[in-house]
Each structure stands twice: as structure tokens, then as C-alpha cells.
Image: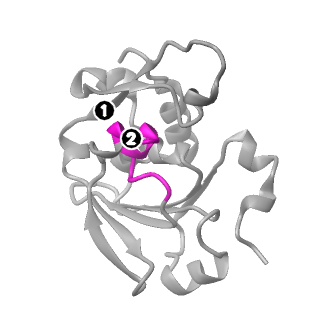
């Protein structure tokens, strides 16, 4: 798959005990183009910038995933899209992946052969990775501590014993943890 680094997902899968080799499965993915991408800050540069192309992957498993988002008004989860194609044309095209900034998201894979669950503490980059990891889990819960206090997370999620936990943060968050909503 052009532009994809399958080594990331393969390395995570190996370390976490599942196999989802994108090198072997590349022919099973369809790469779809979501349009030009310069990033949310691209327009603020004083230099001309040639945009990249924003792409996303689909296959039978990804198309079968069920996604639900926390509704902060009532504390329940409501269904929504995995890829938000309208957001790809908006201010921040990266919001294509799981609607961008969201405190809690659940991705369920009804066709998973493995009953394992993953709790993914993440920033926005985890949103593009989660659909690929979902092939190795029956459920992934994405938690973005920039938008929800961890004490609320304990009330909204029943953490299943024996599940996997992955912390996936870019260096800007990792090196500036004050942006996380903790007391």
C-alpha cells in the first residue's frame, strides 16, 4: 500500500499478541483518496506548500466495524461513521478519522475471531491507526484524555480484566502532559 507504513501495525500486533500483517494483506485493502491535505496549520505558513493527499483504507473487516461516540449530554454512546468524509473537506481534514477530537469512542468488530479488547489512550494520530488495529480485537475503546477527565472515564468504562492497553501519543502531547485533563 503506497504511503502506508505497515511496519507500525505489524510491530504492534507482534508485541500485543495478534497478527494483522499489512504487508501480506495489502491486496485486501482498497486505498481511497479523501482529497488534499496540508494539516490544520498549513494555511498559516508564509511559504507555498504543496499539499499531500489524505488517504484511508477499507476492506471487508473495516467496512463491518461498528463505531459509537460518547454523547457528553447524557453519558451514552451513539452510533456514527468510522470515516467522516464531510470532515475531510472541512477546516481540519484529519477529522476524517473518527470525527477528530472525541473524548471516548468504541469500535466493535462483530467478525473478530479473538474476543480480546484494547483500550487505546491516544491523541488524534491514534484515530487513523485504530481501524487497522481493530482487525485484531473484538472491541477497541479509544480514550482521549485531552477532552475527558480520567475520573469520568472510570465511571463510563468497565475495564475488562486481561485486556490490552496501548498509550499512543505524539511527542507534542507526550512532552507536554499538562494538556491532559488530570487533577
Residue 29: image location, x then y, percent: 25, 28
Q: Nearer the viewer, residue 62 or 174?
A: 174
Disc 1 element = strand
Quadrant of the rendered image containing residue 61 = top left
Q: Which residue is mark 2?
A: 132
Label 2 neighbourhood size at 10 Å, few (<14), some (14-19), many (20+)?
Answer: some
The numbered disc on residue 167 is none
Name the residue rendered at 21%, 55% in the picture.
Answer: 111
Q: Is residue 127 left or right of residue 27?
A: right
**Which residues fall within the magenta stretch?**
88-101
Sequence-first tag of 1 and 2: 1
Q: If the image is split into quadrants, where does the C terminus sit?
A: bottom right
Can you tell which of label 1 and label 2 is closer to the viewer? 1
Quadrant of the rendered image containing residue 155 = bottom right
Q: How far is disc 1 from disc 2 in space, using C-alphas?
A: 8 Å
Q: Are marks 1 and 2 in contact (CB under 8 Å)?
A: yes
Q: Is residue 81 left or right of residue 95?
A: left
Please, is residue 123 above or below residue 153 in the view?
above
Q: Residue reaching furthest front?
A: 46
Residue 151: image location, x then y, percent: 65, 82
Name the residue rendered at 55%, 14% in the picture.
Answer: 49
Q: Is residue 170 left or right of residue 43?
A: right
Name the residue rendered at 25%, 54% in the picture.
Answer: 65
Residue 45: image location, x then y, percent: 64, 23
Please, is residue 66 above or below residue 175 in the view?
below
Residue 103: image location, x then y, percent: 52, 66
Disc 2 element = helix
Q: Which residue is mark 1?
A: 57
Amino acid at each position: 500500500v503506497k504511503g502506508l507504513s505497515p511496519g507500525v501495525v505489524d510491530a504492534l500486533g507482534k508485541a500485543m499478541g495478534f497478527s494483522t500483517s499489512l504487508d501480506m494483506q495489502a491486496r485486501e485493502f482498497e486505498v481511497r483518496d479523501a482529497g488534499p491535505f496540508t494539516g490544520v496549520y498549513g494555511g498559516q505558513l508564509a511559504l507555498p506548500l504543496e499539499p499531500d493527499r489524505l488517504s484511508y483504507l477499507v476492506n471487508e473487516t473495516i467496512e463491518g466495524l461498528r463505531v459509537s461516540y460518547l454523547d457528553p449530554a447524557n453519558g451514552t454512546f451513539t452510533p456514527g461513521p468510522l470515516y467522516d468524509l464531510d470532515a475531510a473537506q472541512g477546516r481540519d481534514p484529519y477529522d476524517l478519522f473518527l470525527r477528530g477530537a472525541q473524548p471516548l469512542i468504541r469500535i466493535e468488530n462483530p467478525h473478530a475471531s479473538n474476543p480480546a479488547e484494547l483500550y487505546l489512550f491516544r491523541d488524534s494520530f491514534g484515530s487513523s491507526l485504530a481501524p487497522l488495529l481493530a482487525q485484531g480485537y473484538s472491541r477497541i475503546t479509544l480514550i482521549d484524555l485531552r477532552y475527558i477527565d480520567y475520573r469520568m472515564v472510570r465511571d463510563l468504562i468497565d475495564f475488562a480484566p486481561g485486556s490490552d492497553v496501548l498509550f499512543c501519543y505524539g511527542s507534542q502531547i507526550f512532552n507536554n502532559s499538562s494538556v491532559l485533563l488530570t487533577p
